[in-house]
Image (tube, rainbow, N blue to C red):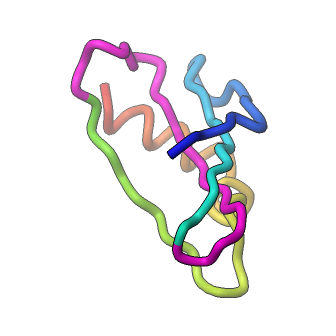
């Protein structure tokens, strides 16, 4: 499965939020998901993962927009 990073933003404390596109074999359409990488993230390390699944009327930006910067700050605290 190929992934395409379509947007990268710096958020709280030098963490990163990415929007990533992939082709879904289930829906036969392109799908987009959001990925939060804490400032402590290293490719060689194990990093905890939290999956946020939005409903039918939402998209990948739902959590980032509605929760806002405070959510990223809290996520950063939980990872460190």
Left or right, residue 23 beside residue 65:
left
Q: Residue furthest left?
A: 46
Seen in the picture, residue 23 relative to 57 is either above or below; the reply is above
Q: Dominant secondary structure of the magenta stretch?
A: loop
Left or right, residue 49 beside residue 64:
left
Q: Quadrant of the C terminus?
A: top left
Among the 4 quarters of the image, the one containing residue 76: top left
> Is 6 or 53 nearer to us in this picture?
6
Left or right, residue 32 beside residue 13:
right
The x, y position of residue 70, in whole percent, is 60, 46
Residue at image x 65%, y 86%? 56
Residue at image x 22%, y 26%? 46
Residue at image x 63%, y 57%? 23
> Is 22 or 63 nearer to us in this picture?
22
Instruction: Report if residue 9 lies within the magenta region.
Output: no
> Is 2 or 9 nearer to us in this picture?
2
Instruction: Report if residue 39 lies within the magenta region.
Output: yes
Count of labels shown? Answer: 0
> Is 11 or 48 nearer to us in this picture?
48
Residue at image x 39%, y 19%? 41
Magenta-colored span: 26-46
The x, y position of residue 64, in whole percent, is 67, 54
The x, y position of residue 31, in whole percent, is 66, 62
The x, y position of residue 3, in whole percent, is 60, 40
Q: Residue furthest bottom?
A: 56
Seen in the picture, residue 30 relative to 78 is either above or below; the reply is below
């Amino acid at each position: 499965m190929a992934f395409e990073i379509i947007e990268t933003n710096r958020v709280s404390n030098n963490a990163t939020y990415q929007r990533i596109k992939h082709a879904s074999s289930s829906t036969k359409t392109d799908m987009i998901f959001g990925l939060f990488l804490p400032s402590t993230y290293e490719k060689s390390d194990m990093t905890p993962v939290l999956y946020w699944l939005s409903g039918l009327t939402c998209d990948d930006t739902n959590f980032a927009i509605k929760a806002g910067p405070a959510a990223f700050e809290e996520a950063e605290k939980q990872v460190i």
